C-alpha cells in the first residue's frame, strides 16, 4: 500500500439510496448541495463526492447541467477536489452515468468495478408515508435491480476516463471487484497509483464488518502491493466504526449523507459537515494522524489539478 501519513477525507453529499422522506437535512437542490459541499470542505474534506437530484422531487438524476452547477459552485468557494459519481443509480444506463466525465472533465470520478444486486428495498420497513409519489416505488424496485457494470462496460468507461484526463476511483463492493481491478491493471487499462474505495454494507455486497475490512485490505495488499491506496465506506451505523478501523490501518475515509443519515444513535446528522467533523475528531484522537489538505491529496493521488477541469 502507498504510504501517506495524513488522512484523506471524502464527503459524499447525497446518493441514490436515501430519499427525502428519510431526513429533512438531505441536500436536494443545487444550492443545498453547494452549501453543504462548501461546509464539508471547510470541516476537513479534501474530496467532495457529488450526485445530483431533481430539484423539485429529489429523485436521483444524471442531468449534466445540474452536475455543472453544483461542481462549479463548490469549486468557486473551495480548493476541494470535486468528484462526480459515475454510479448514479441502478435505474440509469451506463451511457447516462458516464456522461458527466466528458462534460466536466473532473480530476477524479468514481468508477464501479463490477455488477451486483443492489437492494435498498428493506428501508421501506421504517416508513408508512412518503413525501413524494416516486419514493416507495423506487425503493421497492431495487428488489429487482442489477447494478450492471460488465467487463465491456468498464472497459468503455475507462476509455472515457483516459480520454478526458480523469482519474478513476475504483469502487469495490466485494472481494471479486478487487480481482477485476487487478485484471484491468495487468492489462494496462489502469495505472498506478490506484485509488481504491472499499464500499461495505450495501445489501448485495460485502457486509460492513471489521473482519471483512481486514480481508479486503489483505487481499488488496496481495494484489497491488505499493501500487494502491484505499479508503473505506461503511454504510449506515457502521460508518464510524469502519472509518476508525480504516485510519488505524493506514487508510482513508468517506463519510456523508449518501452513506449514513445519523450522527449517533437516533440523532439525525444536520449536515454533511457534521459527519466530517466527527470523523476528523475521531481520526486525530484515535490515531494522531493529521487530515490531508486538497493539495496534499492531489499530489498523493497524482491528479491533474483543478485548473484542468471543465467547470
Image (spheres, helix red, strand yellow):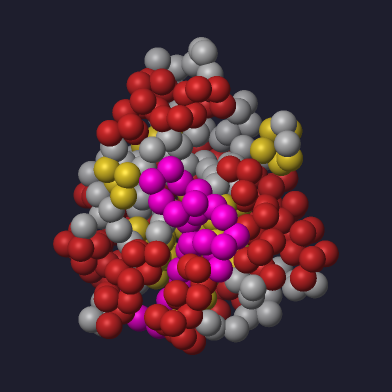
Q: Height in image: 214 above or below 14?
A: below
Q: Nearer the viewer, residue 249 or 130?
A: 249
Q: Residue drawn at (43%, 35%), measured in percent from left and top? A: 120
Determine the residue located farthest toward the right in the rendered image. 285
Please provide percent x and percent y for residue 198: 48, 62
Determine the residue located farthest toward the left in the rendered image. 152
Q: Residue drawn at (50%, 37%), measured in percent from left and top? A: 30
Q: Height in image: 131 above or below 111?
A: above
Please provide percent x and percent y for residue 53: 43, 35
Whether residue 69 is visible to the viewer of this picture, yes or no, is: no
Q: Which residues are magenta?
A: 190-214
Q: Nearer the viewer, residue 49 or 230?
A: 230
Q: Height in image: 3 above or below 154?
A: below
Whether residue 251 is visible to the viewer of this picture, yes or no, is: yes
Determine the residue located farthest toward the top in the rendered image. 129
Locate residue 242: give its quadrant: bottom right
Q: Nearer the viewer, residue 102 or 21?
A: 21
Locate residue 110: give its quadrant: bottom left
Please provide percent x and percent y for residue 178: 37, 69
Q: Residue drawn at (30%, 58%), measured in percent from left and top? A: 114
Q: Nearer the viewer, residue 122 or 70?
A: 122
Quarter in which the C terminus is drawn: bottom left
Amino acid at each position: 500500500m502507498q504510504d501517506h501519513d495524513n488522512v484523506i477525507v471524502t464527503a459524499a453529499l447525497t446518493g441514490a439510496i436515501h430519499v427525502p422522506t428519510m431526513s429533512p437535512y438531505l441536500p436536494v437542490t443545487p444550492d443545498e448541495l453547494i452549501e453543504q459541499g462548501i461546509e464539508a470542505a471547510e470541516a476537513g474534506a479534501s474530496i467532495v463526492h457529488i450526485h445530483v437530484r431533481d430539484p423539485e422531487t429529489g429523485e436521483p438524476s444524471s442531468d449534466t447541467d445540474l452536475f455543472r452547477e453544483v461542481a462549479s459552485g463548490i469549486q468557486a468557494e473551495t480548493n476541494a477536489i470535486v468528484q462526480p459519481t459515475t454510479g448514479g443509480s441502478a435505474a440509469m444506463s451506463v451511457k447516462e452515468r458516464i456522461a458527466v466525465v466528458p462534460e466536466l472533465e473532473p480530476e477524479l470520478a468514481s468508477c464501479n468495478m463490477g455488477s451486483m444486486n443492489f437492494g435498498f428495498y428493506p428501508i421501506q420497513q421504517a416508513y408508512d408515508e412518503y413525501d413524494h409519489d416516486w419514493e416507495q416505488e423506487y425503493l421497492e424496485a431495487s428488489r429487482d435491480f442489477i447494478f450492471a457494470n460488465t467487463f465491456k462496460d468498464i472497459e468503455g468507461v475507462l476509455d472515457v476516463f483516459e480520454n478526458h484526463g480523469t482519474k478513476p476511483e475504483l469502487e469495490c463492493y466485494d472481494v471479486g471487484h478487487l480481482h477485476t481491478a487487478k485484471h484491468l491493471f495487468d492489462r494496462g487499462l489502469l495505472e498506478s497509483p490506484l485509488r481504491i474505495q472499499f464500499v461495505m454494507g450495501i445489501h448485495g455486497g460485502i457486509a460492513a464488518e471489521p473482519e471483512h475490512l481486514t480481508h479486503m485490505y489483505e487481499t488488496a495488499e496481495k494484489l497491488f502491493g505499493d501500487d494502491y491506496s484505499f479508503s473505506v465506506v461503511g454504510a449506515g451505523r457502521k460508518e464510524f466504526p469502519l472509518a476508525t478501523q480504516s485510519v488505524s490501518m493506514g487508510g482513508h475515509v468517506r463519510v456523508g449523507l449518501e452513506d449514513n443519515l445519523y450522527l449517533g444513535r437516533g440523532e439525525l446528522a444536520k449536515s454533511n459537515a457534521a459527519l466530517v467533523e466527527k470523523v476528523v475528531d475521531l481520526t486525530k484522537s484515535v490515531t494522531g494522524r493529521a487530515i490531508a489538505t486538497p493539495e496534499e491529496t492531489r499530489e498523493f493521488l497524482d491528479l491533474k489539478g483543478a485548473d484542468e477541469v471543465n467547470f
